Image (tube, rainbow, N blue to C red):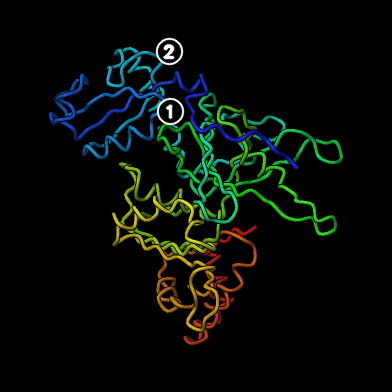
Amino acid sequence: MMHGPTPSANIANNTQYANRFFVYEVVGLGQNGFSDQSEAPVRGSGSVYITVPYNRMNQEMQRITRMGGKIVNITPLNGNQNGQTATQTPSKQDQTASTTKSKSKRKSKEKKKSDVPVNLYKPKEPLIGKCVENRELVQPGGIGRVRHLTFDFSDYDDFWYVEGQSIGIIPPGKDENGKPHKLRLYSIASTRHGDYGDDNTVSLCVRELVYQHPETGETVYGVCSSYLCNLEEGANVTITGPVGKEMLMPSDPNATLIMMATGTGIAPYRAYLRRMFKEQHDNYKFNGFAWLIFGVPHTENILYKDELEEMQQEFPDNFRLTYALSREQKTADGNKMYIQNRVAEQVEEIWDLIQKENTHTYICGLKGMENGIDEALSAEAQKHGVDWPEFQKSMKKAGRWHVETY
């Protein structure tokens, strides 16, 4: 069992990160009330440069959005800028150096977009990241603990990943045999550019494993999940990877994605959806259709609920969100509503969609969830005179059927 200190509530307590600043290049504000009242210079192109401390990045993003602005670039500001006002313009030398580094790193990653990085860092020579965010995703009244963690790897220019991959975490300490703990794999919950858009972070969605020992009745906590859920912001983390090609996101911007998840199986889909709908890319603009069927016990257990529902409202023609709340919703015959029941309810439409050659179907979450989904689709296939195992095999061969359960 591993217990650590409770994660700090404010990253500003970590001096190293509290003193770190980033420069937002914002368009869309123009000569409006916001820019008129600030000291931020407005270029002829309409760009405003705003210097933001690390611990206020999310709040500033939200404020800029409310003002009608759009962030088109984020670059780190070199040097210790503590004491600058949030709207002070960086020196031309600092701005050029940081922008060049950011563009160089992104260009390198985009250039390799047809490749998939695998095991850039291995257990014998791991990457040492730093936890910069650790927040609870389960709302009061929900079951268990699930944390959203973000790790900074800005000291490693050669590390990168793509949506649908996993990283390994090696917890500190030794096992019952006196040997170092083995790595545990976790699906990445951020896009290749990270939650802050600077190509320097990777995020995970981790549920703390807690169970009763079958013989002693003792409460047992998962070694790695407990370590991560109790990790302090500012602490170092040993990372390996990335690994995995099974759950990769299709490069076709017109593809249809049917995504089925239970619990933390939402992680790779969060990455897909943020790339589709939250980020802006010159070389990728999603015009297809994404359908997420998400199974959890209670409303309070819907991970990333606000993010998901905001995207559904903003992109109703491209994104559909369906919940299966097992402790709250009932099937037509009065039983609990699990994800396989939702699939059975919608199976005719799902069947039609998977006939398209550019439809990708994903299943991610607890092992065994695929069995009920198979049953529902097999019954529908039989109505059309199709042998489901053979049809499923053809989709796998075409790279359109993706399963990752644990």
Relative to 131, 79 lies left or right? left
Location of residue 207 in the rendering, given as x and y in whole percent from the top left corner: 60, 49
Q: Quadrant of the N terminus?
A: top right
- Binning the other alpha carbons within 10 Å of mark 2 as few (below 14), some (14 to 19) or many (20 upward) gives few
Residue extending farthest front: 141
Q: Residue at x 53, y 83 (%)?
A: 379
- In primary-sequence order, the first of circles 1 and 2 is 1
Relative to 205, 36 lies left or right? left
Disc number placed over residue 260 in the picture, else none: none
Q: CA distance from mark 1 to mark 2?
A: 15 Å
Disc number placed over residue 80 in the picture, else none: 2
- Quadrant assignment, res 316: bottom left
Q: Amino acid at mark 2?
A: Asn
- Quadrant assignment, res 308: bottom left
Relative to 118, 362 lies left or right? left
Foreground of the two, 26 or 357? 26
Badge 1 marks a residue whose secondary structure is: helix
Relative to 309, is 106 above or below? above
Relative to 58, 157 lies left or right? right
Relative to 309, is 71 above or below? above
Q: Amino acid at mark 1?
A: Asn
Q: Residue at x 29, y 62 (%)?
A: 317
Badge 2 marks a residue whose secondary structure is: loop
Foreground of the two, 200 or 138? 138
Q: In this figure, which residue is indicated by the disc labeled 1?
A: 55
Location of residue 385 in the rendering, given as x and y in whole percent from the top left corner: 50, 87
Please tell me how many numbered marks the rendered image carries.
2
Q: Residue at x 67, y 35 (%)?
A: 4
